Amino acid sequence: MSAAPIIVEVAVPSPLYRSFDYRLPPAVAAAPPPGTRVLVPFGRQQLVGMVLGTRQHSDLAPGKLKAVSEILDAEPVFDPELLQLLRWAARYYQHPIGEALATALPVALRKTKPVAGDNGTVWRLTELGREQAPARLAHAARQAEVLEALQSHPQGVAREALPVPLSVLKALQSKGWILEVAVEPGASAPTTAAVPHGLQLTKAQQHAIDSVRVAGDQFRCFLLEGVTGSGKTEVYLQLIAPLLENGRQVLVLVPEIGLTPQLVDRFRSRFQLSICVLHSGLSDTQRLLAWRQAANGQACLILGTRSAIFTPLKNPGLIIVDEEHDGSFKQQDGLRYSARDLAVWRAHQLDIPILLGSATPSLESLYNVQQGRYQHLALAQRAGNALPPHMRLLDLRGQTMHGLLSDALLQTMHRHLHNDGQILVFLNRRGYAPVLLCHACGWVAECRRCDARMTVHRRRGELRCHHCGSQRPVDRFCPACGSSELLGIGEGTERVEQALGEHFAGQTVLRIDRDTTRRKGALENALDAAQSGQARILLGTQMLAKGHHFPGVTLVAILDADQGLFSTDFRASERMAQMIIQVAGRAGRSDKPGEVLIQTHHPDHPLLLQLVAEGYPAFATAALQERREAMLPPYASMALLRAEAAAAQHPRTFLEEACALAESLREDSVQLWGPVTAPMERRAGRYRAQLLVQTAERAALQRLLSAWVPRLDSLKAARRVRWSIDVDPLDTY
Ligand code: ADP
Ligand code: ZN
Ligand code: ZN
């Protein structure tokens, strides 16, 4: 009689809210540990799944159990800690476990190829190799790639992590540039320690560092609220240094690495050891390399965007989330997680400190401080000799305007240029004009796929929709009446660039927005010109607002503060305040004082008045009070069920069915709002509607969601829509 088969529970990437049981082939004596990838038959396909555990019994009859086709890893790719984080995230954000796990894997590991084990050797640069510039190997791209990889990983890189044929390595070896060396087991500690020198800390910086150090090896969440230019980054660097020396790893999450190459440089130049930088520009193999180096402890400092929260860590000592208020920490499709919130959860589970930093903390984090959950650390003054920028509202009513440039603004700009200052002009609207209007009949160019207007991009002679990306040539004649009098109404960065060029002939005007920085390297070049002061007038969208340190900027001009003042979204004012303070924070960061002009037609608006007179903390206190009175997050929890379809009635029908189901499941404390059509109902050709679930009792929300969401696909109307659930949504439209 043969022994009963071993049954494993496997998460398979499918939209189903459950795991599946498989048996192991008889030849396999022991179950692979949780976190191991397996190839399994699923329907007619073979899919890469992940073992979650073993089971004594399956609900399926033994004869019905399918067998695992192949065990793909010799060792689990997720350790128990990471697996637990992901299982929690899948539950909390109501996402199918198999898909959640797949999301967190590097793409290279989502495929069926087994990952080769370590053969105990790594490739390293020789002395000669270190002197070579990869650029000189332009004709041998793969050799250059290897050189680059090895230069950024001085301790060496395993063969499996180098994405090239062996012949390429051999070629480099015969030049004497690289060599293969054995790594002694257990000798994974970094060989090069951190460069010790840092700046002389201010008292407040020192206090912040001491506070985090006191937490030592225990979970504690700190909110570092430091005004722009107060030296938050220096705090990070000096907190990190001793940890790295002791062989601990530090995970640093940042909003968008591409936008802040300066920040990456500061980390690189301070710590001459293996830094892993995880960003969207990495190839699949590079990402896998980084992942493995973090997992085996070779990489000490892991710097990455949102998805880096899923990096395995061998010996973590600290997590840092920089610019914690930034919306990009929230994933907007699939597993809709907040990397910041997961970071806090992970630190708790790892029992290590976590530091959230921002000049404009989210109301959520400030609320957690009020509740005593987070410890508040403040850097109230700018570092060095820098003074806080002087902010002023510029009343546009009655001003002579040149497009968006008022007379008063132009005068101030001339004064700053005359005094050798540098100017940053901010307008969060790209393109030439946001509206194309027929002067004869009033026709307006609209997107054919969205309920939105097309933006005129003049240099390319195109109309573009900023919501769905569709584009077409600018009309020469009005399609409604045939008139040729078509006017671009309103102002985008392209048009302001033109106006600035006319007003300030002879000065370099540098526009930085998504349109001017599409080409590879374009953003880096622009930022260099901005930082060096070579470009006197910088003009840009929020790309220019984020974390940059341009020492020469003395004047920041916010051209249009009115855009965000009257939005219906309850987070609009928070976002607006953060943006204004962040942009303003680019002024006067060095020896020369900074001035900030905010153009508005609503100089009496309470938000603007308060921000300018009292600063962000006062705004935040008032905003929290309003949220409390309105019972909005963070005083309440929300989830948003969205649905879309090619026909307008389907999302409504689906959401009505979903609403009825929720009615039957909900507790009294949970409220349902809707369904309603989305504020922009049609987008990219699809009609959208939504249902909001809200409660003051987070646990009740979770109970409802767990019972409700897995049943949504079985509703009658579900087949006709695409739906998604967003827990703790950032946008409620
Ligand atoms: P933040 O991240 O808070 O905006 P940064 O860390 O970029 O601020 O610091 C702003 C500037 O102040 C940088 O040029 C930095 O080198 C400098 N700086 C930071 N800390 C100190 C210090 N303790 N003494 C002198 N200069 C400092
Ligand atoms: Zn017309
Ligand atoms: Zn569109």
Image (cartoon, rainbow, N blue to C red):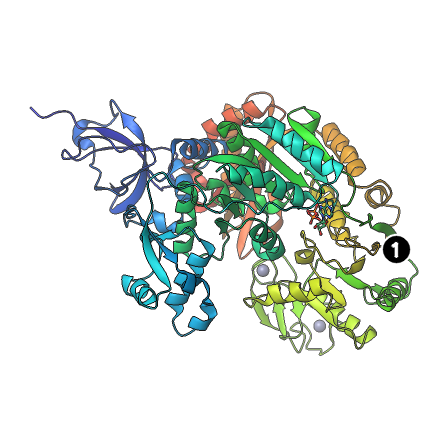
Q: For the point 63% across and 46% down, which residue is it?
A: 197
Q: Position of residue 78 (x, y in %)?
A: 38, 37
Please tell me which residue lies in front, 350 or 94. Answer: 350
Instruction: Give the answer, above or below, for where 404 lies relative to 97.
Output: below
Quadrant where the image shows the C terminus = top right
Please tell me which residue lies in front, 121 or 471. Answer: 121
Residue 534: name its quadrant.
Answer: bottom right
Type of amino acid at the residue the image marks with label 1: Leu
Q: Position of residue 591 (x, y in %)?
A: 81, 55
Instruction: Give the answer, above or below, for where 555 lies relative to 371.
Output: below
Please tell me which residue lies in front, 83 or 396. Answer: 83
Most extreme residue toward the top is 668
Most extreme residue toward the right is 398
Ligand 2 placement by image quarter: bottom right
Q: Position of residue 189 (x, y in %)?
A: 43, 41
Graded by Cα atoms within 10 Å as few (under 14), some (14 to 19) or many (20 or more), the crowding at tag 1 reads many
Horizontal side of residue 313 vs 625, given as left or right: left
Tell me the residue that label 1 is attached to.
394
Q: Position of residue 635 (x, y in %)?
A: 67, 28
Please tell me which residue lies in front, 590 or 455. Answer: 590
Q: For the point 62% across and 72% down, which residue is it?
A: 462
Horizontal side of residue 278 vs 614, given as left or right: left
SS state under label 1: strand
Quadrant where the image shows the N terminus = top left
